[in-house]
Image (tube, helix red, strand yellow):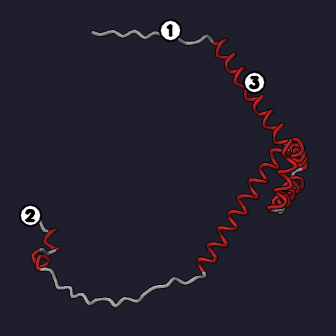
Amino acid sequence: MKSFQYRQNSTSLSPWVSVLILLALLTAFFFVAQYVYKFLFIISPIVIIATLILDYTVFVNYGRLLMAFLKQNVVVGASMIVLSAFLFPVIAAFLLGKAIIKRKIGKMQEQIYRDENTFTNYEEVDDPVINVSKNENAKKYDYNKLFEDV
C-alpha cells in the first residue's frame, strides 16, 4: 500500500510578514488615491465648466437628487450633501463623464431617427414561377406506418 506525505508550511510566510505586506499595499493604495484626489481637485474648476457647457441638466438633476434625499430622510440627505462637499472633485469628474455619455447617446438617437425617416432605394424584381411537383419518395413513406408495431 502506498502512503503519501504532505508537507505543510514548507515555503509559506509567517503571518507577521503577510500582515506587513498587507499594510504596505494599503499604504500604497492610500497614497495613490491621495494623489488622484489632489489632481482632480486641481482640475475640478475646468471639469465643472466643461460639464456645464456640455449639459447643465446633469448638475440640475444631481441637485434634485440631493434634495430628494433630504426630503425623504434628513440625516441621509444631510450626510449626502456633506459627502458631496468633501468629494466634489470626484463627483465633478463623474458628472462630466455622465454629460459626455448623454451627449453621445443623443447624437446616436438623432442619427437613428434620421435613418428611420429616409427611404431606401430598391428595384422591383419579377418573381419567376416555380412549379413544385410532388416528390416520388414522399409517396413511398407513410407517416402512420411509423407508429405501427413491428
Of pointers 2 and 1, the one earlier in the residue sequence: 1
Residue at left offset 58%, top offset 82%: 118
The amino acid at mark 2 is Val
The amino acid at mark 1 is Ser
Residue at left offset 85%, top offset 50%: 46
Mark in the foreground, 1 or 3: 3
Residue at left offset 14%, top offset 80%: 135
Q: Position of residue 28 (x, y in %)?
A: 73, 26
Q: Position of residue 141 (x, y in %)?
A: 12, 74
Mark in the foreground, 3 or 2: 3
Q: Secondary structure at mark 1?
A: loop
Q: Secondary structure at mark 2?
A: loop
Instruction: Looking at the picture, tell me which residue is in the foreground, 147 or 9.
Output: 9
Vertical comparison of 96 with 127: above or below: above
Q: Which residue is mark 2?
A: 150
Q: Which residue is mark 3?
A: 27
Quadrant of the rendering where the N terminus is positioned: top left
Left or right placement of residue 113 versus residue 148 in this view? right
* Mark 3 neighbour density, 10 Å: few (under 14) some (14–19) many (20 or more): few
Marks 3 & 2, CB-CB < 8 Å contact: no
The amino acid at mark 3 is Thr
Distance between the alpha carbons at the discs numbered 2 and 1: 70 Å
Vertical comparison of 17 with 94: above or below: above
Q: Which residue is mark 1?
A: 10
Q: Position of residue 73 (x, y in %)?
A: 87, 51
Q: Secondary structure at mark 3?
A: helix
Residue at left offset 15%, top offset 68%: 146
Distance between the alpha carbons at the discs numbered 3 and 2: 80 Å
